[in-house]
Image (cartoon, helix red, strand yellow):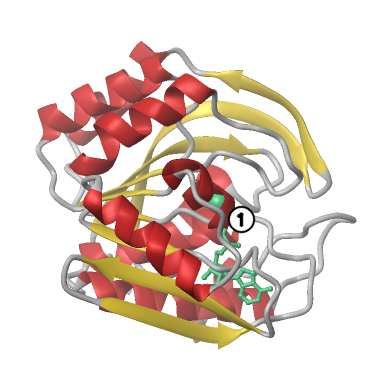
Amino acid sequence: MKIKSKILIIAGSDSSGGAGIQADIKTVTALGSYATTAITAVTSQNTKGVKSIIPIAPREIFNQIIFTSKDIRPDAIKIGMLHSTKVIEYVIKSLENLKIKKIILDPVMVAKGGAKLIDNKAIKSLKLKLISKTILITPNIPEAEILTNTKIKNQEDMIYAANKLIASGAKNVLIKGGHLKFKLVKDIFVNKSEIKVFTSKRYKTNNTHGTGCTLSSAITTFLSCGKPIKKACELGIKYVNSAIKTNPKYGKGYGPINHLNSMKVEKKFK
Ligand SMILES: Nc1ncnc2c1ncn2[C@@H]1O[C@H](COP(=O)(O)OP(=O)(O)OP(=O)(O)O)[C@@H](O)[C@H]1O
Ligand SMILES: [Mg+2]
């Protein structure tokens, strides 16, 4: 298979391999593109929870982004966990330096086990400084609630919050519905001119570790290969849905999904 595009991932490391940088690299690779990385933090975690988080110094994050991208220029950038205001400032500085248009932000705030991954000041600078520099943000329900100061219980609330984010400077918003408990799962895409509800089958499983990271990386990959933003969201959701369906049932807590669901190994390697 010929490599289709190059993606820079700015995110934290998940030692259990289901979320964070590890999920991002697997997703980008399984969808046919090349991943470079800037690691923002190193977490020790398993499917049951986070044991520790070691932040990487902001200047080192900046160096990873610039030194690598000046050599291997990415077609698109996916941003995940940014834990402090200082990190956000350095990331913005690096983005301004690189001038790449296709930037997707997954505003990660809380891990599936409940651990808080970002401080309150950082949430404010995400809102005020970073969101407007991206082409798409992909908050889950709790993140959309925090970013908009609203309560989200159903589809109407999701649309209201998404419109609020558009009004405050976001270009495209995909609010993920994984945290609501309806029979069907709905992810809602909104921009200035349209609203699109993506409806998928909800699987009864705890094995959804890293669905958010995986989705934003999948969308970034499709976008980097030239798909329009709404189509990239649709394909990303399909990839995650099929990854949940075929999850490998690893670990005793929230297990990982199957990032390889899109792949076939060539005969000569069998
Ligand atoms: N049980 C499920 N069945 C089917 N799809 C799901 C399920 N849970 C989540 N999804 C899908 O996974 C994607 C990510 O949504 P989710 O709301 O879980 O994001 P998240 O909370 O950011 O994930 P993470 O915990 O990895 O950060 C969405 O497309 C959502 O519809
Ligand atoms: Mg998430």
Give left or right: position of 249 versus 126.
Answer: right
137, 42: nearer the viewer: 137
Residue 269: x and y, percent? 54, 76
Residue 107: x and y, percent? 44, 44
Q: Is mark 1 within 8 Å of ligand 1?
A: yes
Eyeballing the image, is 26 above or below 73? Answer: below
Report the residue that reaches farthest toward the right: 252
Looking at the rendered structure, the number of numbered marks drawn on it comes to 1
Eyeballing the image, is 101 above or below 245? Answer: above
In which quadrant will I find the N terminus?
A: bottom left
Residue 24: x and y, percent? 48, 52
Q: Amino acid at mark 1?
A: Gly
Give left or right: position of 161 versus 117.
Answer: left
Regarding mark 1 in the picture, which secondary structure is present there? Answer: loop
Instruction: Indicate the quadrant where residue 94 lies.
Output: top left
Eyeballing the image, is 199 above or below 92? Answer: below
Residue 137: x and y, percent? 35, 53
Please say whether residue 121 is visible from this viewpoint. yes
